[in-house]
Image (cartoon, helix red, strand yellow):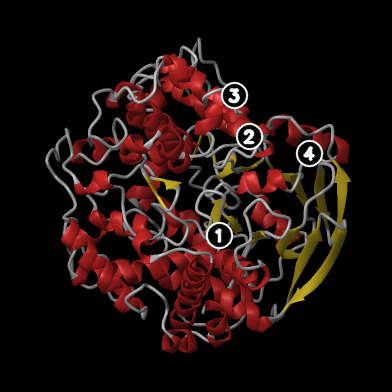
Amino acid sequence: MPSSDAAKLLRVNLTSEEVRFEELDLGTRRAYLGGRGFGILFLYKENPAGVEPFSPHNRLIFASSIIGGAPVPGINRISMVSKSPLTYGFGEAEAGGFFGPELRRAGLEAIIVEGRAENPVYLHVEDGRAELLEAGELWGMQTKETVEEIRRRLGDPLIRVACIGPAGERLVRFANIIVDQRYAAGRSGLGAVMGYKRLKAVAVRGRGRVEIHDPEKVSTLARWFAENWRRYPGANARHTYGTLDGIRGLNMDGVLPTLNFRGGSFEGLEKISGEAMNETILTGREGCYACPISCKRVVEGKPPYITDPSYGGPEYETVASFGSLCGISDLSAISYANQICNAYGVDTISAGNVISFAMECFESGLIGEKETENISLNFGNTSSMLKILEKIVKREGFGDILAEGVKISSEKIGEESIKYAMHVKGKEIPMHEPRGKVGVGLQYALSPSGADHMQCAHDPVYEREAEHLKTLGINKPVGRLDLGAEKVRLFYYSTLWWGLLDSLCACKFTFTPHPAGVYTPNHLVEIVNAVTGWGTSLWELMKASERAINLARLYNIREGHKPDMDTLPERFFQELEFGSRKGQKIPRGEFLRAREIYYKMAGWDEGGCPTEEKLQELDLGWAIINAN
């Protein structure tokens, strides 16, 4: 049976218009696996130290993985990596759908883009061939128009397109890359990097077959998933309600971000719940490549906020960021905001966050209608939320300031507004309240890409026994508010596991601990071995994850990140103002101690830098000199 020991890498220089293919050797593939691993390896080695995010020398990497494209549920994602214009450090985003598998069928595991085109272009990849094509007429188009026009030009409706909208072209710092107008690589502002490079889109078509070592085993694993996923409550709930399945629980538990993280419960919750969506605007369900769960929503908003179903529908993060965070309970309006973000190409988490920040500044008197051009930015004002969002994506008026993200916006508005800017390292806080899930606070502070809720399992998972967790050495429950050494250990192990999923471009919803997920860690090992024939182990895979995490840490240190940036907004050390957890806060001393323990467990020094011994243990000795 065949074994895949080499794969293709495509290099694209937009300045010289050079396109060339290279081999990815087996050693690199086993050590870094793909996704995050490939991204940080190429970024660290090839980006000049201190390079600006908006520079021809800043690389933009698209990476699948060693198992991408295999016909198994849950391994369909695509990773995108660059230096972030929000954090000025490691920037990472992932998207589901079909682009990743299509890239693999086209014969590639990764694309590295450098340079800057003189005029707008798009990259066309098809069955082992690649070319840069003129995109002047596409510049200015929204994402749906872009996808449709590229497919029309190339005469193929099955081409998969990752593109930017007008927000990326205008360098909105939290612009994203949208795949097929509905799957968002949402975080870190990588759409702005693509816009700076004048790269409108990457269009991929592959008719080949991904090389599989043991096709029968792969078929058995896929069949097992198809026959068993309905046994797991979490998978069933995501099929029924999408990622909105947990919003009621978050609200009851007092950890639903509300009014710019002032409280944890929202009075209008029932109007924006998964049940409400199903009963009012839901028109269909969609899934990613090879996955039967179909957790993606398709909606059609009600007048006056009619939406186009081809843009899909809002996920939980979107509903919370434009809903409870801004005090909005109109689900159609929230869906319309989601459509604006998908059409123009901006991250819904950052967009809702920056609007709620502006609303608090407005209600506190730090800005007024003179600055907002007669828009009354009060919490709960639906029309104002949509008006300011339109200005942000177009960089018009006050929207031009907010398009910089909350960190830079607060610096421009004035020192008094900084306390309302909810971010870590410049990236806006996701829709999970850490005062009721303290491990989430550690995620935000220690994530290599800034505030990110998808770096490890959330605290309630640790409160129950699960075979999945025991596989990782997590054998007894720990409370969600515990910030002691046991919690830090669980957090560390979980970070390695979820980092592995990022390197393998795997869907975390299918691999979270039972009953939320379906697979176990041992299933992942089986999938890797069935596809590659390597005979690898969970140990080897977890060390690859640790290698990528440490290299990302080194990269951030090289780019000027300091230990004091591993912290949280001051608001999280203060009491929640309302909700079922009113009065709760993160004890600052416990948080700082937990951070110190994490550094030591990870093999980092007191400043958070990986020690020489740790780097040698991970075969990263080559990076030691570069780190100093």
**Considering only order in the chain, which callout, 2 or 3, is on the residue closer to the N terminus?**
2
Q: Are marks 3 and 4 in contact (CB under 8 Å)?
A: no
**Considering only order in the chain, which callout, 4 or 2, is on the residue closer to the N terminus?**
4
**Considering only order in the chain, which callout, 4 or 3, is on the residue closer to the N terminus?**
4
**Please, what is the three-letter code of the amino acid marked with disc 3?**
Glu
Q: CA distance from mark 2 to mark 4?
A: 25 Å
- 308 left or right of 5 in image: left
- 398 left or right of 614 in image: right
Q: CA distance from mark 1 to mark 2?
A: 29 Å
Q: Are marks 1 and 2 in contact (CB under 8 Å)?
A: no
Within 10 Å of the Cα at label 2, are there few (<14), some (14-19), or many (20+) other Cα atoms? many
- Residue drawn at x 56%, y 81% as measured from the top left: 623
x then y, percent, for residue 518: 40, 58
**Please, what is the three-letter code of the amino acid marked with disc 2?**
Ala
Depicted 414 relative to depicted 445: above or below: above
Residue annotated with mark 1:
75
**Considering only order in the chain, which callout, 1 or 4, is on the residue closer to the N terminus?**
1
Nearest to the eye among marks 3 and 4: give it.
Answer: 3
Residue annotated with mark 4:
157
- 13 left or right of 189 in image: right
Nearest to the eye among marks 1 and 3: give it.
Answer: 3
The quarter of the picture where the N terminus appears is: bottom right
**Considering only order in the chain, which callout, 3 or 1, is on the residue closer to the N terminus?**
1
x then y, percent, for residue 275: 34, 28
Residue annotated with mark 2:
167
Q: CA distance from mark 3 to mark 2?
A: 11 Å
Secondary structure beneath label 3: loop
**Please, what is the three-letter code of the amino acid marked with disc 1?**
Ile
Q: CA distance from mark 4 to mark 1?
A: 23 Å
Residue annotated with mark 3:
396
